[in-house]
Amino acid sequence: MTQTIAIDVQILPHGESLPLPAYQTAHAAGMDLLAAVPADAPLVLAAGSHAMVPTGLSIALPDGFEAQVRPRSGLAARHGVTVLNSPGTVDADYRGEVCVLLINHGTEPFTIRRGERIAQMVIASVVRAELTFATTLSTTARGSGGFGSTGR
């Protein structure tokens, strides 16, 4: 069963008139984030370039949660546009604007218009680790096999 938590959202002046992020299907893990660029000044992302795209939202996550900003598969598949620092992390103590760092890996410029769905935001539980010093580690069948070692 899916857990639901309440998250306070502040709409910033440049985000007014845009709907809140929303799940597009009953079982979607991510809510779509919308571009809060001016209606009369879309952002053109040249091929090979990146830009920080505002969402017009700030959020207050409860302690023990994070928001992950992830790419939208349709933008990546059709245009080569994706989230550069994927997944971007919004920590529970951050209160600034949620922005999306997009990069255009495509061959053509991509225009981002106001209200366009640019990324998805997944709310996830956080588990914090306590690191302890060890002189040796337990052994496993894999051992120290790194990149590509399990594909043999």
Image (cartoon, rainbow, N blue to C red):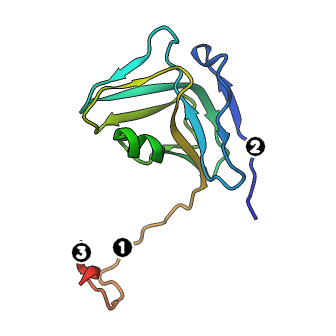
- Return the x and y of residue 78 as percentages of the image width and height: 39, 41
Q: Nearer the viewer, residue 12 or 25?
A: 25
Q: Residue at x 53, y 61 (%)?
A: 128
Question: Label 3: how many residues lie within 10 Å, few (<14), some (14-19) or many (20+)?
Answer: few
Q: Quadrant for the C terminus, please.
A: bottom left
- Return the x and y of residue 91 as percentages of the image width and height: 53, 43
Mark in the foreground, 1 or 2: 2
Say which residue label 3 marks: 148
Q: How far apart are marks 1 and 2 (CA)?
A: 38 Å
**For residue 119, side relative to residue 81 (left or right):** right
Q: For the residue marked with disc 3, what is the amino acid?
A: Gly
Numbered disc 2: secondary structure: loop
Residue that protrudes farthest toward the top in the picture:
40
Q: Is residue 139 above or below residue 151?
A: below
- Return the x and y of residue 38 as percentages of the image width and height: 50, 12
Q: Distance between the residues labelled 1 and 3?
A: 28 Å
Numbered disc 3: secondary structure: loop
Q: For the residue marked with disc 1, what is the amino acid?
A: Phe
Mark number for residue 133?
1
Say which residue label 2 marks: 6
Q: Can residue 30 be seen in this view?
A: yes
Q: Are marks 3 and 2 in contact (CB under 8 Å)?
A: no
Question: Who comes first in sequence, dot 1 or dot 3?
Answer: 1
**For residue 85, side relative to residue 60 (left or right):** left
Q: For the residue marked with disc 2, what is the amino acid?
A: Ala
Q: Which of 38 and 132 is in front in this view?
A: 38
Q: Residue at x 63, y 33 (%)?
A: 59
Question: Who comes first in sequence, dot 3 or dot 2?
Answer: 2
